Image (cartoon, grey):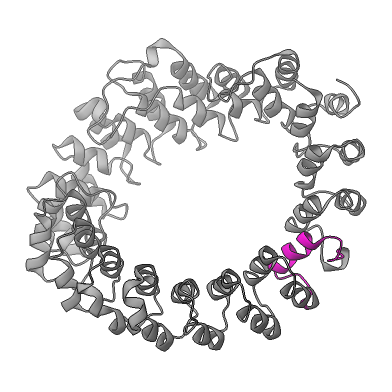
Amino acid sequence: MRDRELRQALAGNPALPPVLISRLIEGADDELAECLARRTDLDPEQVRVLAARSDDIAAALARGGLLDAGDVDEAVRPYTAMVLLDEGRGRQEWAVAFAGDPDPKRRVSLAACPDLPAQVNLLLAADHDFEVVAELACFTTDGDLLARLARHPDDGVRVAVASNPDTPPWALAELVTDPRSEVIHSLLGKAVDNPATPVGAVARLAGHQSSFVRRQLAGRGDLPVEAAERLATDPVPGVRAAVAEHPGLSEATMRRLADDEDREVRRRVARNPSVPLDLLGRAIRKTADGLLPRIAAAGPDEVRELAGSPSPQLRMRLAERRDLPPEIRDRLARDPDAKVVSAVAPHPGIPEELLRDMVARHGARVIARVAANPDASAGLLTDLAGRGADPEASAVLLTDLAGRGAGPEASAGLLTDLAGRGAGPDASAGPLTDLAGHEPSVPKVLRVIARRADAPAEVLELCLADVRARVIAAAHPNLPAARIVELITAGAGGETDEADGGDIGLAAEAAANPSLPVEVMERLSGPGL
């Protein structure tokens, strides 16, 4: 590995001492200087030296809050001055000067800046380059100016005005009804999607020839019921799907949409907050995902009704709530259907005896979800980890246990055991629970553990053997210093540069590791390795 690449990685090390930062700055090329400019702990002299190198580096320092307007000459560092204007920290006289800049790209950049003086807004609104005007129309918050620009002759400017939520509602309504807009579908779509546009002005577009416009309109929750009902019969599935969540649809319409031939339409009607409970059983036939709004809003009587429903799909959806009364929660935990038990398994408060009973009755179909329960004891987790060696226990269990290990109950020994299973042949992926949509690879456990702040050193060593976890583990501060140095040494002499973490990638991550010994940092920051 070339010295330059290691130094660039070292430049991002959060534990790099100030004296070594200054040493790197002194001998930095442009790439290393850019890396150093991203640090947030530079002292004023270090900032001054870096800012003097180029406008790009000065701009990076400005974005990081290390330069302000008093440090910048806009004639020498125009890009940096523009960055400060964009962040609301520039000088108004800069904006006036840039408004007359002969470079249209610079005027476009200025037009996107917030809180511009009124004088500058007027200059930009009159710009002969309509791209500048359109950019201003996108970002200005001046309602009077937007009302003027709504009558601009350029279509692109009017489209930008239609998308701006600070455009006055009356101006948006005027834009929608302008005959010129009828064929500008992008303008109508932006106006329909803009919450500031009065719904009365756009409801008439339910019969518009463009399916794009109708689809945008169908997604408005404030749409009049008559327009929503019309869109629910639209020949385009995407339009029907967009309107299916409208809370004002009639029960008859929702029942028809629940039997729609299009899967997305059925999925979206199941998420309608007004859908009848008895209809959910049909609407969610393997289509709905996550907790449904209607079930989340169900009252106590409805919760009891759902818990006793003959439909396992409905009981499963109820089981996804995490605020169930103890008697309902435990009733679902004893459900004969594994999908219901799996859904309720992570619910807080389930007694350990019942958690163990769930595993005894349903085995691999619920083990992973039981392992994710926040109240699972260390003893239960250890028992479940032991089952992970059985071919019936899937890789999902190992991953969930590694994630569950983020709690205080997970010991270093348990994590080491999990990492070993993830790396070993006994941890091959087995059958998954019914709820799992795919079978994750076992090494995912290693990646999960490598990202944990409390991952033990012995587990990180196992992670280094995995092609995807190794780059995470190499930067982990719990990795022993001697091992970090070994990775740098191997990378410095290696020739592989693989995207999946070859010697070079590992060495770079190790060089950025805050546990890297200072004496090694000194060597890497010197004139030669």
Whether residue 519 is situated above or below residue 241 in the rendered picture = above
Is residue 176 shown to the viewer in this render? no
Q: How many marks?
A: 0
Position of residue 330 measured from the top left corner of the image (x, y, whole percent): 23, 45
Position of residue 138 measured from the top left corner of the image (x, y, whole percent): 53, 72
Whether the magenta-drawn stretch holds residue 512 is answered as no
198 or 299: which is nearer to us?
Answer: 198
Whether the magenta-drawn stretch holds residue 89 is answered as yes
Quarter containing the C terminus:
top right
Task: Give the side of residue 374 with respect to residue 157, left or right.
Answer: left
Whether residue 493 is situated above or below residue 96 in the rendered picture = above
Whether residue 307 is situated above or below residue 342 in the rendered picture = below
Q: Which residues are magenta?
A: 72-92
Q: Residue at x 10, y 66 (%)?
A: 253
Position of residue 139 measured from the top left corner of the image (x, y, whole percent): 56, 72
Position of residue 126 measured from the top left corner of the image (x, y, whole percent): 62, 81
139 or 129: which is nearer to us?
Answer: 129
Is residue 140 shown to the viewer in this render? yes
Task: Give the side of residue 340 with respect to residue 33, left or right.
Answer: left
- Quadrant of residue 381 in the image? top left
Task: Give the side of residue 505 with respect to residue 57, left or right.
Answer: left
Task: Give the side of residue 339 with respect to residue 443, left or right.
Answer: left
Quarter containing the N terminus:
top right
**Residue occupying the far top of the picture:** 425
